[in-house]
Image (cartoon, coloured by chain):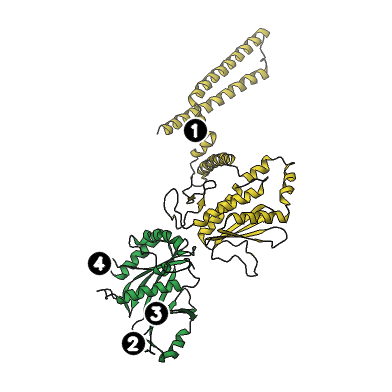
Chain colours: A green, B yellow
């Protein structure tokens, strides 16, 4: 597992989400990338019911990633993270009295997975309650483990198919105190997805972007 | 068109020439027949001789006539075979049953191939002569008798000395950690970890570097039974390429008299990969080409280039 960057790609004006995704696929294939199956990332939100006093209730996110199909990744709002077995979902049902599932807050990103040399590219459509809200692009450079080292290289690669709208170094990496070493699990990636999902959730529903 | 016409004329001349040859042969036969029969029975001896001589003269004149005729015709026939680039084999192209026996086209193909082969072989041999790999050049250059004498002195070095050289090199480069293993007897295997970029396994024979393999920093260098895995290649294209280049470097840095210098130069060269992902290509100025960063390092200047950008 190398250095990963997740970013949102704006929908091209006058085109639907689907068309923009297809355009991205086309550009990747022209570059020489090879399609390798599909992927999904999903996220469910839970509220803590044991709310004490004036503090706003903390949120708990339970996420799944098709790269680690046997694990379930749990992230507290600004707190610790946890990688658990897949049947953690069942445990959450038992903990109903402490954590309540926020209905209709389930977000997921699904799409195709491409490989190009040592890069892994995942172009996904972000859907919330069955309406397409945006496009996520995840680029992973698996040969390197230090984000600061290969960032320029990744930026050049992303420019080659995303055009000028390339994001800055993800904040997950820049805020890390010691070194820029990405740990072996995919928490950094999930953090970035979470950030992206909450950004998209706050967005207004784009007119005419429903799933067809 | 001209060719076709020519062939037609020649064919006519040919048939005439063949007729002329037949005539010549028959006239020559007549000469010998008359000679064999000898003089015919006549009343007088003089008469006999006279008739014989006239017959003989007539026959010889006929031979002469036919011969002149043949010479005239042979000029007309000319030499068609030499006008063709492939000489006599060119006549195969005249074969009317092309489809059944495509001999001529096959012949042309084979000719082209052999021409090309000769050309490329010539190029290759001139190139190889220019930049002969030093290791093999040594084997050819040094006389066969001297070679075995040189080998033992450098191949059988005390273990202590090898350890010493390696640890000195390790102290020279603080960003490079070198671990030494001796899994099977006296030969050393080095595990070189370069920053957070790569790990290289260097298999040594005494102080000669025998083989090297480069893997990613986060890749496994041990096999399941806990030994160093010196065989399987990296999963990443970048490091597969770097492995190739490192093998080239092994062949480049050769100095049989001073093996410690060789190891030191190789390690200096390997250390230039510490900025593998951070340095753009010195020629094209880009980071990526075909999805790979600049994997080549110049042997002298240690500058970074893409594999296709160097020279």
The percent position of residue A17, horizontal first and vertical second, equals: 31, 70
Quadrant assignment for the N terminus of chain B: top left
Residue B84: give its label.
Answer: 1
* Residue, disc 2: A54
Q: Are marks 2 and 3 in contact (CB under 8 Å)?
A: no
> Is label 1 in a helix, a strand or a loop?
loop
Query: Is residue B205 among what the camera can see?
Result: no
In this view of the protein, which residue sits in the foreground, B260 or A100?
Answer: B260
- Looking at the rendered image, the disc whose residue lies closer to the viewer, 2 or 3, is 2
In this view of the protein, which residue sits in the foreground, B66 or A140?
Answer: A140
Q: Are marks 1 and 2 in contact (CB under 8 Å)?
A: no
Q: Which residue is pictured at 33% across the width and 64% down the height?
A: A23
Question: From the viewer's perspective, is residue A29 above or below residue A130?
Answer: above
Confirm whether circles 4 and 3 share one chain.
Answer: yes
Q: Are marks 4 and 1 in contact (CB under 8 Å)?
A: no
The percent position of residue A20, horizontal first and vertical second, equals: 32, 67
* Residue, disc 4: A14
Q: Quadrant of residue B189?
A: bottom right
The percent position of residue A198, horizontal first and vertical second, equals: 34, 76
- Looking at the rendered image, the disc whose residue lies closer to the viewer, 3 or 1, is 3
- Mark-to-mark CA distance, 4 and 3: 36 Å
- The crowd level at tag 2 (other Cα within 10 Å; few <14, some 14-19, many 20+) is few
Answer with left or right where residue B221 lies relative to residue A111: right
- Mark-to-mark CA distance, 4 and 2: 45 Å
């Amino acid at each position: 597992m190398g250095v990963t960057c997740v970013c949102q790609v704006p929908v091209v004006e006058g085109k639907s989400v689907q068309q923009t995704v297809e355009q991205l696929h086309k550009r990747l294939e022209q570059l020489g990338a090879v399609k390798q199956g599909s992927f999904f990332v999903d996220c469910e939100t839970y509220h803590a019911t044991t709310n004490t006093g004036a503090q706003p209730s903390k949120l708990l996110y339970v996420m799944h990633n098709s790269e680690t199909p046997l694990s379930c990744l749990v992230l507290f709002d600004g707190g610790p993270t946890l990688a658990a077995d897949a049947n953690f979902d069942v445990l959450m049902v038992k903990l109903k009295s402490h954590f309540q599932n926020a209905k209709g807050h389930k977000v997921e990103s699904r799409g195709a997975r491409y490989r190009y040399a040592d890069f892994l590219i995942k172009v996904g459509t972000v859907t919330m309650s069955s309406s397409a809200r945006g496009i996520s692009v995840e680029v992973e450079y698996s040969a390197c483990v230090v984000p600061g080292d290969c960032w320029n290289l990744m930026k050049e690669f992303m420019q080659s198919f995303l055009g000028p709208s390339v994001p800055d170094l993800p904040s997950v990496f820049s805020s890390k105190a010691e070194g820029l070493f990405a740990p072996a699990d995919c928490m950094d990636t999930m953090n970035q997805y979470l950030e992206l999902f909450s950004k998209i959730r706050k967005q207004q529903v784009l007119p005419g972007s429903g799933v067809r | 068109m001209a060719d076709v016409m020519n062939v037609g004329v020649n064919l006519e001349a040919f048939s005439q020439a063949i007729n002329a040859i037949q005539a010549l042969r028959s006239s020559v036969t007549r000469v010998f027949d008359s000679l064999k029969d000898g003089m015919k029975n006549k009343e007088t001896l003089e008469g006999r001789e006279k008739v014989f001589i006239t017959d003989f003269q007539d026959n010889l004149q006929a031979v002469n006539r036919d011969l002149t005729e043949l010479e005239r015709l042979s000029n007309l026939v000319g030499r068609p075979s030499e006008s063709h680039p492939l000489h006599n084999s060119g006549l195969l192209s005249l074969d009317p049953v092309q489809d059944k026996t495509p001999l001529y086209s096959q012949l042309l193909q084979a000719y082209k191939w052999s021409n090309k082969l000769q050309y490329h072989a010539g190029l290759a041999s001139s190139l190889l002569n220019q930049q002969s790999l030093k290791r093999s050049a040594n084997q050819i250059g040094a006389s066969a008798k001297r070679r075995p004498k040189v080998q033992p002195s450098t191949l059988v070095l005390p273990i202590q000395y090898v350890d010493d050289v390696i640890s000195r090199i390790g102290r020279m480069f603080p960003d490079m950690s070198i671990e030494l293993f001796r899994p099977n007897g006296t030969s050393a295997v080095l595990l070189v970890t370069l920053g957070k970029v790569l790990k290289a396994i260097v298999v040594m024979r005494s102080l000669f570097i025998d083989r090297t393999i480069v893997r990613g920093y986060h890749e496994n260098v041990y096999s399941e039974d806990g030994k160093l895995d010196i065989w399987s290649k990296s999963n990443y294209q970048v490091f597969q390429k770097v492995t190739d280049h490192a093998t080239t470097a092994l062949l480049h840095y050769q100095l049989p008299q001073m093996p410690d210098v060789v190891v030191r130069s190789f390690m200096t060269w390997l250390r230039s990969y510490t900025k593998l992902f951070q340095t753009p290509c010195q020629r094209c100025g880009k980071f990526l080409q075909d999805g790979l960063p600049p994997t080549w390092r110049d042997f002298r200047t240690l500058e970074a280039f893409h594999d296709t950008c160097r020279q």
